[in-house]
Image (tube, rainbow, N blue to C red):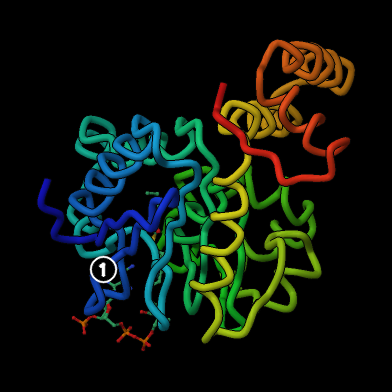
Amino acid sequence: MGYENIRVEKRGKVGLITLDRPKALNALNSALVAELGTALDGFDADERIGCIVITGSEKAFAAGADIKEMQPHNFSSAYQTDLITPFDRVSRNRKPIIAAVAGYALGGGCELAMLCDFIIAADTAKFGQPEITLGVIPGAGGTQRLTRFVGKSKAMEMVLTGRMMDAEEAERSGLVSRIVPADDLLEEALKAAEKIADFSLPVVMMAKESVDRAYETTLSEGVRFERRVFQALFALEDQNEGMSAFTEKRTPQFRNK
Ligand code: HXC
């Protein structure tokens, strides 16, 4: 498929998606979000891909949903067009997705980053939910996910005032996993993705599923889920390979079986 708003590449076992509407600071219009969903579904289905990276430009990961596209909507058209459901294709993806964020990640851009499995931030990154300044509120999970990441007080302040958070504050408050110099962002994100993609894919997928359970269920049910997955992994050849390689002091050769 030809993409107009994103660039899609395979780097070995890593699927790389670059948001590419530079003139609009990668504002997420419906065409871009549809293309992103298609690319993600393609990588999910591609058995050679073990991890996905989503990134933007130096200036912006994404400056939010496209305000010019949203402006004419009324309730009925916003409801019927459903601006938001296409974002679900990010969280539905079963493979790990890393957001590599430089510059602005605002509104839907911040929400997109939070829909990924973890965020690596350039030292230039700025996160915010400025929807209040436009007369709306976050619509793609921002009030819920930001609160889970950074706690009520900070999330409430950001959502109510539209204040942005820089990379340092984002790392301090648990929104991002780590900060890297802007020049190294893509390399660092790809390095992390390659590392993940070299592990056993079914194990990686179940690790992701298990961490995600922490957000969906009680502690005791989550622990029960994890325990059953842990036990089930002993049915895989890759468990035997991983543990044999350790005892034989060699590098494991995982075969995704
Ligand atoms: C459409 C956008 C845009 C956006 C920037 N642009 N953000 N277009 N939607 N979200 C466009 C500008 O109109 C401008 O185009 C060009 O990108 C460059 O932007 P400037 O404003 O000139 O750049 P700068 O002065 O550097 O300011 C950067 C900025 C600012 C601080 C990021 O652009 C800004 O505040 N953008 C809006 C951020 C925002 O409110 N996001 C939340 C959106 S609501 P022209 O053609 O004029 O040169 C949302 C709801 C999600 O995300 C709901 C779920 C789907």
- Label 1: element kind: loop
Name the amino acid, label 1: Asp
Is 168 placed left or right of 138 in the picture? right
Which residue is disc 1 drawn over?
Answer: 20
Instruction: Pinpoint residue 50: horizontal percent, then vertical percent.
Output: 49, 41
Q: Is residue 119 above or below residue 187?
A: above
Q: Residue at x 65, y 52 (%)?
A: 146
Q: How many numbered circles does the render carry? A: 1
The residue furthest left is: 2
Q: Is residue 95 above or below residue 21?
A: above
Instruction: Pinpoint residue 235: horizontal percent, then vertical percent.
Output: 70, 10
Q: Nearer the viewer, residue 210 or 166?
A: 210
Is 167 placed left or right of 229 in the picture? left
Q: Quadrant of the C terminus?
A: top right
Is 109 placed left or right of 205 in the picture? left
Q: Residue at x 43, y 58 (%)?
A: 54
Q: Residue at x 39, y 32 (%)?
A: 47
Is 65 placed left or right of 51 in the picture? left
Q: Is residue 119 above or below residue 198?
A: below
Q: Nearer the viewer, residue 237 or 106?
A: 237
Q: Residue at x 29, y 41 (%)?
A: 83
Based on the displayed image, in which of its 4 quarters is residue 134 positioned?
A: bottom left
Instruction: Pinpoint residue 17: horizontal percent, then vertical percent.
Output: 35, 57
